[in-house]
Amino acid sequence: MTNPPQHIVRSFDEQLHGLGEIVIRMGGMAESQLATAIQALTKRDSDLAARVVQQDAAIDALEERLNQDAVRLLALRQPMADDLREVLAALKISSDLERIGDYAKNVAKRVIAINQAAPIEPVSAIPRMGRLVQSIIKDTLDAYVARDAERAIDVWRRDEEVDEMYTGLFREILTYMMEDPRNISAGTHLIFIAKNIERMGDHATNVAETIYFLATGRRMEGGRPKGDTSSFAIVEPPESTEES
């Protein structure tokens, strides 16, 4: 069996490289969307939040382009072994990145809503969680570029820190809502914002697992570390300060 002509091999490599470039562009856009949404929250800037909502379509368009390119490559090239893993990983990672973009859009929509009410104190804690998830997304993309299995494992482990931060925020926001019913509307939006950020961390963890498989050909062993206990959270009602 003769080897394929050099120009065919080069064309195939370029197509594989093109999928990777789209993944990296999507990741950079998703990371930027999260950062901008958090900035809109801290600055109470509804115009900035609206920009995040509008820009989500660009990430969706990139995912659609990657899907089309990947299907065409699979049909025409019939890749095997490592090359097949590259294509399948790009498809799976792009889906997770698109979901991260969706959650950033959801955060921005909640920011627009929350800006209609008076600010409440727990807002100050959410940017810390957002910056943590943003750093995890960045490190995940670096792991993808380098095909670094060890860095992917590190990202995978850091998801527990995000979950623990979310649980703490959940309890804090509930407390504020119970102390003053006027905080209920804004507090509800904050809980959804925090949950959306936590879900971004989950999808970044999914990407890390895919990168590990891409780099090693094996799946990660063991259960995913989880620190989200908000489902079991019990918040005691504040003691009454009224005199009997």
Image: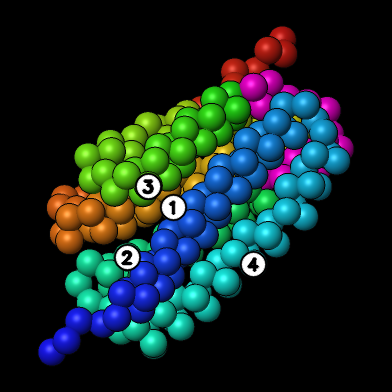
The amino acid type, in three-letter code, at marker 1 is His
* Residues at discs 3 and 1 in contact (Cβ within 8 Å): no
Residue identifier under label 2: 86
* Residues at discs 1 and 2 in contact (Cβ within 8 Å): no
Q: What is the crowding at mark 1: few (fewer than 14 residues within 10 Å), some, or many (at least 20)?
A: many
Q: Main secondary structure of the magenta part?
A: helix
The amino acid type, in three-letter code, at marker 2 is Glu
In terms of depth relative to the viewer, which is nearer, 188 or 138? 138
Residue identifier under label 3: 145
Going from N to C along the chain, the mark reached first, 3 or 2, is 2
Q: Secondary structure at mark 3?
A: helix
Q: Is residue 230 visible?
A: no
Distance, label 3 to label 2, CA atoms, is: 12 Å
Going from N to C along the chain, the mark reached first, 2 or 4, is 4
Q: In x, y percent, where is residue 151? A: 28, 38
Going from N to C along the chain, the mark reached first, 3 or 1, is 3
* Residues at discs 3 and 4 in contact (Cβ within 8 Å): no
Going from N to C along the chain, the mark reached first, 1 or 2, is 2
Going from N to C along the chain, the mark reached first, 3 or 4, is 4
Q: Is residue 44 left or right of residue 92?
A: right
| Quadrant occupied by the C terminus | top right
* Residues at discs 3 and 2 in contact (Cβ within 8 Å): no
Q: Which residue occupies 80% across, 39% down? A: 48
Distance, label 4 to label 1, CA atoms, is: 19 Å
Q: Is residue 128 left or right of residue 211?
A: right
Distance, label 3 to label 1, CA atoms, is: 18 Å
Q: In x, y percent, where is residue 98? A: 55, 59
**Splitting the image into 4 quarters, where does residue 88 fall?**
bottom left
- Label at residue 203: 1
Q: From the viewer's perspective, is residue 144 above or below residue 219?
A: above
- Residues in magenta, as a range: 107-124
